[in-house]
Amino acid sequence: AQKVTQAQTEISVVEKEDVTLDCVYETRDTTYYLFWYKQPPSGELVFLIRRNSFDEQNEISGRYSWNFQKSTSSFNFTITASQVVDSAVYFCALSDDSGNTPLVFGKGTRLSVIA
Amino acid sequence: GAGVSQTPSNKVTEKGKYVELRCDPISGHTALYWYRQSLGQGPEFLIYFQGTGAADDSGLPNDRFFAVRPEGSVSTLKIQRTERGDSAMYLCASSPSTGPGELFFGEGSRLTVL
């Protein structure tokens, strides 16, 4: 069975600090996809990134970066120079490659960025 | 509209009543998903449609829950004989196709059963 664990329930940082959100996953599939979604106070989940299990290159998009390590089954998300607008709940999610298994989400990490 | 639309945004009902939650996906999206999110938890899968048919309803908690998508666009999640434990945010998402792609979520319908 697939499982996603986000051990950090809540994190609080001061603006401009860097912060890393952890995600550990379990799957028996050899091919799978990992995702991060952001859920701001409005409630609508917003897609941030999708990563294929064969692509272990780290990715950077502006202040966001993702570190995928297959050896430790982790897909961590770092926000550099955090801003108040980054305050939200962040979810890591996992799906297999078949398209027949729905996305499995972790419990989320609530990030509060204080000015 | 451009995004996924869910109505009502808030619904308060009494235990035992029947409730319908509506989802209007992004035009042209063939896949539609329903998730339920309780406070402090991640979204939990309920059911998804590919076109008009339910491709996977394994997440529906019991037979009080049912969903339809008769014309392959708008979907309605129906809950009979509501219980207090049904209180949650119900999220709808759509996607251009099934497969491990991006899901586009609506803002959800918050259901409170008194």
Image: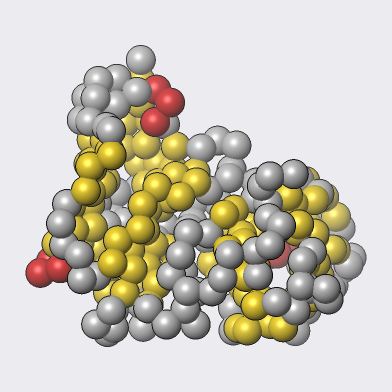
Q: Position of residue B62 (x, y in %)?
A: 69, 82
A71 left or right, relative to A87: left
Q: Position of residue A86 (x, y in %)?
A: 39, 31
Whether residue B108 is visible to the viewer of this picture, yes or no, is no
- Residue pictured at 50% horizontal, 46% vertical: A46
Whether residue B10 is visible to the viewer of this picture, yes or no, is yes
Quarter placement of the C terminus of chain B: bottom right
Q: Observer-nearest residue: A55 or A42?
A: A55
- Residue pictured at 65% horizontal, 77% vertical: B50
Q: Observer-nearest residue: B77 or B85?
A: B77
Residue furthest to the left:
A71
Q: Position of residue B8 (x, y in %)?
A: 81, 49
B19 left or right, relative to B45: right
Say which quarter of the image contains residue B44. Answer: bottom right
Q: Position of residue B76 (x, y in %)?
A: 80, 67
- Residue pictured at 27% horizontal, 32% vertical: A63
Q: Observer-nearest residue: A50 or B8?
A: A50
Say which quarter of the image contains residue A70. Answer: bottom left
B60 versus B41 height, above or below: below
Quarter placement of the N terminus of chain B: top right
A24 left or right, relative to A103: left
Residue furthest to the front:
B28
A84 left or right, relative to A39: left
Q: Observer-nearest residue: A17 or B50?
A: B50
